[in-house]
Image: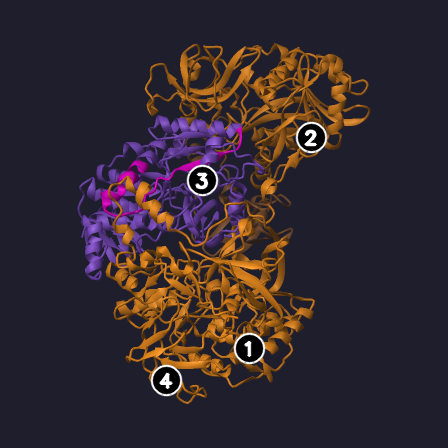
Chain colours: A purple, B brown, C orange
Amino acid sequence: MRYSGFSIIKQALTGHKSWPKAWRTPDPKPAYDYIIVGGGGHGLSTAYYLASVYGAKNIAVLEKGWLGSGNIGRNTTIIRSNYLLDGNVPFYEMSLKLWEGLEQDFNYNAMVSQRGIINLYHSDSQRDAYARRGNAMIMNGADAEMLDQDALRKLYPDLNYDNARFPIMGGLAQWRGGSVRHDAVAWGYARGADRLGVDIIQNCEVTDFIMEKGACTGVVTNKGKIMGKKIGVAVAGSTTKVMSKTGMRLPIESHVLQAFVSEGLKPIIPGVITYGMGHFYISQSDKGGLVFGGDIDGYNSYAQRGNLPVVEHVCEGGIAMMPYIGKAKMLRMWGGIMDMSMDGSPIIDKTGIDNLYLNTGWCYGGFKATPASGYCFAHLLANDEPHENAAALRLDRFSTGAVIDERGAGAQPNLH
Amino acid sequence: MIINHPLLGPRDASEFYYIGDAAMIMRPDAKPDDHSAETMAAFDSYQHHRDNPHGFHRELWYHEQGDRSWLIVTRNTTTHEITKVELARDVKLKGGL
Amino acid sequence: MAKTFRLKGGQINRKTPLNFSFNGKGFSGFEGDTLASALLANGVHLVGRSFKYHRPRGILSAGIEEPNALMTIGTGADADPNTRATVTELYEGLTAKSQNHIGPLGFDLMAINDRLSNFLTAGFYYKTFMWPAAFWEKVYEPIIRYAAGLGALSGEDDPSRYDKGYLHCDVLVIGGGATGLMAALTAGRAGLKVVLADEDFRLGGRLNAENDVIAGQKGADWAREISAELAAMPNVRVMTRTTIYGAYDHGIYGALERVGEHKSDQSGTRQILWRVYSKRAILAAGSIERPIAFQDNDRPGIMLAGAVRQYANRFAVAAGDNVSIFTNNNDGWRTAHDLSAHGVHIAAIIDTRHHPLDGEGLSAPKDCRVITGAGIAGTKGRLRVNSLTTTTGETIKTDAIAVSGGWSPTVHLTCHQRGRPRWRDDIAAFVPSGDLPMGMVVAGAANGEVSLSECLSSGHDAAAALARDLGKSVKKTPLPKVEDEPSFGIEACWHIPPKNGRAWVDFQNDVTTKDIILAEKEGFTAVEHLKRYTTLGMATDQGKTANIPGLAVMAEITGKTIPEVGTTIFRPPYSPVPIAAFVGRATGKNYMPTRLTPSHQWAKDRGAVFIEVGPWYRAQWYPEPGETHWLESVNREVIATRSAVGICDVSTLGKIDIKGKDAGEFINRIYANGFAKLPVGKTRYGLMLREDGFVMDDGTTARLAEHHYVMTTTTANAVGVYRHLDFCRQALWPELDVAIISTTDQFAQFAVAGPHSRKLISRIVDDGFDLSNEAFPFMAAAELTVCGGVPARLFRISFSGELAYELAVPAGYGNSLAETLMAAGEDLGVTPYGLEALNVMRIEKGHPTAAELTGQISAHHLGMERMLSKTKDFIGATLARRAELTRADGYRLVGLKTIDPEAMLTAGAHFLDRGAATRRENDLGWMTSVAYSPMVGSSIGLGFVKDGHNRFGDVIRATDFVRGTDIEVEIVHPHFVDPEGKRLHD
């Protein structure tokens, strides 16, 4: 059934009795052309684009839990393409463009809301760094605008302009940035993929790869062996665990990132805004909750929870920027596991094992990348060569030095 | 978290700075102006590849807001339980990991 | 006078009446009331509107689980939205306002949504509002956002004060009810250091709400007695109004103590955020009653039975004149019994069980209709329930319904480290599993104990066991005896399917059983899908009353057991914590510590304009009278320095003393260029790489003695370089005999630069120190004394490109050294210069700083590839050879000079060839630093240009799209002034 205003009215008048399942719950077939390991945002979008753009048939998505149970279900929902470096900007700009047409494409309202993102600057050197970034964005076809304090005051009149430890001088705006209802992205891709015939198999955990003559020919799961001609792994947070079956050592460490949401409040923060002297980003959801976050906890962890020092640190950044959120009450804090790469940028590449492909290293920027990640991973799976916008996201870039290190922090994952 | 510093006793983890895998103490050897592929591969792996285990992980913590010891902490990455804390210096002097 | 619902007795202080207002209307209550109990005493049930349908809502509970009675307390900047009236302690002058309605509370214009509820089912918005695409931000979303949220922030800076603290204890007892009191008493008597925390302002928990008899006295009195004993123990800290909101690693708990918000005078500290470090913790958090869903079960006047009992017994308030009971367990009967004892008429008891109270002591009050094996089929009453209809078809007039669906143990904290609770059929509830946070045990109702005597014994036993575990002996003491305990006798019943209406599960988020059925129909059966699709349990109460009934309904329609459906993960905080509480006093200027250099006062006295540089404040320039623009000041400072002598405070540079027999070897391994042959008394520029071959930092290192070196780092990297050195020293090469110490704070350091600098320095060095070019040439270093015996370090190094020195003295002499230099150089035209002039001069000389050393830059990019030693291994040696770092056509640091002398360059501009289109492929690089050079007479810059060293003389464009400039520049060598470096050696 196609979703529309009409379908809702019709169902409302008939007691909502004939809504179909959003997706099927098929049993796995013995073999597929494509197996996508991981039913999170990236895995589902990969399957969706494989089917819708690359015309692939006979696709399975294997998810160990419930679909969308990974980081697509626990993030701060921000979309943007305000990156600096050549390897990143075209990719994230592609993603932003895909977001812009996504809902009509997969017939699901994921509430893509381009209310704008502003990165504040607090010194001349930071302003210049943002100018460099804004110019890089424009050269890549993205939008960017420098705001001085006067322009910023019009949008955010109550920031701490007058008593700040670090003055708020202005910001770099990307008006096409914003937020998206994160769960709906997983559901929209899942429903879209399902309608194109993709088998989404939940509660199906991959426990091993089947190897024949150095090539990967299938996977072993708790629902039995499933053979595949091509196998793509997109299991953020579990990448090392899954890929360790192949013996690969990867340029990633797993870290916990906490995120926070306040109780519902009447709208007070129009867009996404980030503080520049301490890591803090915030937006307000359509339900009224302030959704915010900051740094990762900074130590290797597979526990989806963090600790208090970072909570306090994040809140300090928030109050430094907007002292009027003091009485907003934090309702929930949670942690997600990030595959932090050695340069802070992702990997979409072949693995060196025939038929096995890898999508990982999203650090804590994976949500906004969901459409382009799936699109480019689908391209790689279908064509055996990288999509032009993901050509730099290679696994071997550490040995060549062609790293994409936005922060200039080097091979220390907790700094990215 | 609380790290039981071998010299100072229990200390809050927020006093420490973390860099990750204790394998970082095992820097490969290189000759001067060493252009060999083996050396490059050894450093590439040393610098970029991680075991990143589920479970016990030996890792480097620096008591920056304390006595400035580099420690090797053995900690479970799924439960955060810490089972051993050593001075990095001692581990390295005894031949490393 | 309006009718009062105040009863006799209770734990309120009738001698202290308190006035308060609700929605502008004045009321009064008593000390010991909550806002909710005081409102109920005045007959006010209607207190809010639901989130989605704007249904009229009343007080449901008497605790933190309250979904309906959310209010804004206070006005103006003090306004505190979304505050639960059920836990808000009444104080004189309290002002409360209801939330989330347009127009008066009794006639909310947004209630139109309720009429549209058939269209606004779970997830309806995912299915529509997609066309046309541009309408989302412009039309649909603004409407949705207009309706968003409950309370409102004032928009003003939060004026309240918050503090933070740390507590250490052997045992943290969480919850001060019967179990917690018994546990704290046992632990306290055993001599353990105990913290007992309870969110209520009165210890006792349910003892205050019930009529239990313990050790021959009323439970509440027993609690008072034990509280007093605990308060008198020096090893016990009793914390009321304190919520343990989270369980973190290694026995650390987060606590929020509300110390001021219950006072009329709100000027003191409002809340204290504690971090509690415990060896062990006993969770004695009790349990939370849950409702049963039935048609129109959300009307004001429909409450939890335990809450109705609590209002009667503790607050002496009747929920109504004619109360009905709806229950699936014996607790409902207890409510009937207690209310009846207070003289409140019980209209009916409707029990879902067919044979309740077999062999039990409780009985129905007089004149009370008892209907068993039945449920409620519907209710009436727009703003307050006025009747109910049973499933047996009877309509009963009633003004309040007390609903008891059983009790859910408060397992939240046991789940904060991802422990999953397990289901117990006999009590129809989840109880903690064995997978608890380290050091935690659970006792009492939180652990599924249903009787008071079991609670007391489990509290005692838990404390005794861990006291022994911690090496204390525990004296055997008999437990206090509990009299006449009723049994529980629950037979699970979660909802009565509505015939033609809706039955609410999650009151605040307006989730009904219909929504759950729809979610199942559409395949959202996994518990997390259910929650996310319907928003069940995601409101401010986090589903404390809603989650289990919601799961139960899903279990029923899918034919699964409740544990098969699953549990959602409880996340911290247990109850909401203000963001400001996590911040404490680190607000405004106190956001980050402030570092001032030793001569800050001197600079301030001279009128310096300061700028934040990381934690430092540094002098940016020193305006003179008559100067109207900063550039005037900076040009003057540059010219004075280049023509006479200037002094600049460079104390913020990182300074590291390195000593030991192997210090030279150590430094040689750290820097990329050779240091093995640095003689005593000399300084050398050093380039430091990270192990991945990119540039980490640069600076100078001087050898002051055979085994003593002094390293300087950039201001920005002072901490990182020290940490790196310590890592190399301890973890890589512990066999080397090296010791290091940071002396950044121990020395004040000044650059003295310009043609007259030697003359100036010579006037302050103590007798006999030879400053001649021969004796103290470029790059010389020495320890000496100045100004008559002040120990000092002198380096002949130059960042400005002039004949220059850097002079370091112990920090305490910094201020007077600045004054002395200024006085001594008056006739030489000595001029203080700030960070801006320093920057101009270093750009004129092409020296990189933080703007160039971004961590993404290699030695090749800087044009310093020849510094990479070929005669040693060093940190970064191997990976610096990677192809991308060394490619011949890669970025190179160059100078940029405007063609139009009037044009002003900007840092951050990108380079394009003339005529090249604005495309990524045409991006040649970017401008890193710019300055107006009074020596060149135009704006100059440094930047990275692809293949830049083969493009000297080319004219390209510096295009700054975001600032709207496009300026032609010539690529030049990055040495604009004295390119041969003659002045350095004069």
Numbered mark located on residue C600 in the image: 2
> Which residue is depicted at the point 43% across and 17% down?
C948
Label 1 packing within 10 angstroms: few (<14), some (14-19), many (20+): many
Task: Name which residue type carries label 3.
Answer: Ile
Q: Do residues under tags 1 and 4 come within 8 Å of each other at their CB atoms?
A: no
Numbered mark located on residue A273 in the image: 3
Provide the secondary structure element on which disc 4 rests: strand
Q: In the rendering, at what x and y percent does residue A194 appear?
A: 21, 51
Residues rendered magenta in the picture: A95-123
Residue that badge 4 annotates: C370
Question: In the rendered structure, does residue A156 fall within the stretch colored magenta?
Answer: no
Task: Name which residue type carries label 4.
Answer: Val
Q: In the rendering, at what x and y percent does residue A166 appear?
A: 56, 35
Q: Nearer the viewer, residue A26 or C512?
A: C512
What chain is tagged by disc 4?
A: C
Number of marks: 4
Q: Nearer the viewer, mark 3 or mark 4?
A: 4
What chain is tagged by disc 2?
A: C
What chain is tagged by disc 1?
A: C
Q: In the rendering, at what x and y percent does residue C573 appear?
A: 49, 57
Q: Are marks 3 and 4 on the same chain?
A: no
Residue that badge 1 annotates: C456
Label 2 packing within 10 angstroms: few (<14), some (14-19), many (20+): many
Q: Nearer the viewer, residue B51 or C40?
A: C40
Provide the secondary structure element on which disc 3 rests: strand
Q: Do residues under tags 1 and 3 come within 8 Å of each other at their CB atoms?
A: no
Asked whether, in this view, residue C83 is left or right of residue C370, the answer is: right
Provide the secondary structure element on which disc 2 rests: helix
